[in-house]
Image (tube, rainbow, N blue to C red):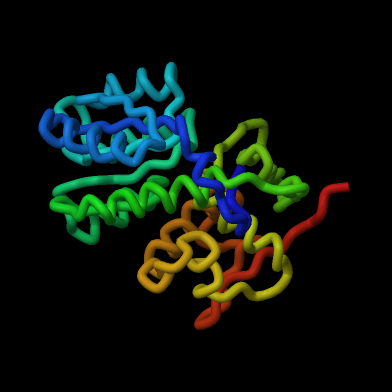
Amino acid sequence: MYNRGQVMDMDMLKDRKILVVDDEPPLRQMLDALLRKEGFYRIYMAQDGASALACIRTDKPELVILDVMLPDMDGFELLAAIRRFSSVPVLYLSARGEDEDRLLGLGLGADDYMVKPFLPRELLLRVMAIMKRVYAPVVAESLPSFILGACSVDLEQATIQREGSELSLTPKERGLLLKLYEHRGRIVTTDALCQAVWGDDAYSYENTLMVHIRRIREKIERDASSPQHLLTVRGLGYKLIVKETS
């Protein structure tokens, strides 16, 4: 379940499965040693996109660490393919550090983007942060379902039913919609949304938030360029207009 602010016991991270997708054997070996040293993870390795897709379908990892430059497809194509059937959290680890690449990856549904070379401790902290946000249990309260025009949103299942089709929500999209739903009909500031989803590092995620808001609108709005349900309140933040389910 998605984290709603609970503290996560470290034992909850034991046996969590991580898939590392990179075509450089030395880096794969280094990441394998680094993650296993923490004692919390089961590590899978893939050197190309095809192997990664097969692993995600069969072994169902709970986090994917993904390079952008792969031999058979780039990491952006791979993430788009992953998002057709899975909302597994994805952390990009790439030598491509341009803002355009970072925003593209986040816009496709990645949870974080790090640039090589990186500090091993920072990578571990980001992995831990994603695990805590996504897998901390929800205590004694189920996540809501609600109606947005022609869409039925189920945050418990992280799905949207729209015109006979089912769309998946990424963990970030679900977290943002949850925060907006909790304050439905009222303005939620940009800072509050970033804090709810990215935690203590929220100050650097305002542009990333805009990308995720756009992606949500593409899923819930009839016309994403003229939203009726997820509204921008210029200079302040966003507001969600909701019809409750019976």
> Residue 72 at x, y = what percent?
18, 25
Figure quadrant of residue 81:
top left
114 relative position to 215: left or right: left
* Whether residue 228 is visible: no
Q: Is residue 212 above or below residue 66?
A: below
Q: State the residue at coordinates (46%, 45%).
A: 131
| 92 relative to 108 in the view: left or right | left
Residue 228 lies, in percent from the top left, at: 65, 62
Q: Is residue 198 above or below residue 116?
A: below
Q: Image point 72% across, 66% down: which residue?
A: 184
State left or right for residue 6 relative to residue 75.
Answer: right
Q: Residue at x 58, y 70 (%)?
A: 238
Location of the N terminus by quadrant is top right
Q: Relative to the observer, which residue lies in front, 205 or 163?
A: 205
80 vs 240, left or right, is left
User: x, y (%) of residue 160?
Assistant: 63, 41
In this view, the residue farthest toward the bottom is 235
Count the marks: 0
Between residue 114 and residue 9, name the one nearer to us: 9
Residue appearing at x 44%, y 64% in the figure: 210
Q: Position of residue 4 (x, y in %)?
A: 63, 56
Please indicate, yes or no, whether residue 242 appears anywhere in the rendered image.
yes
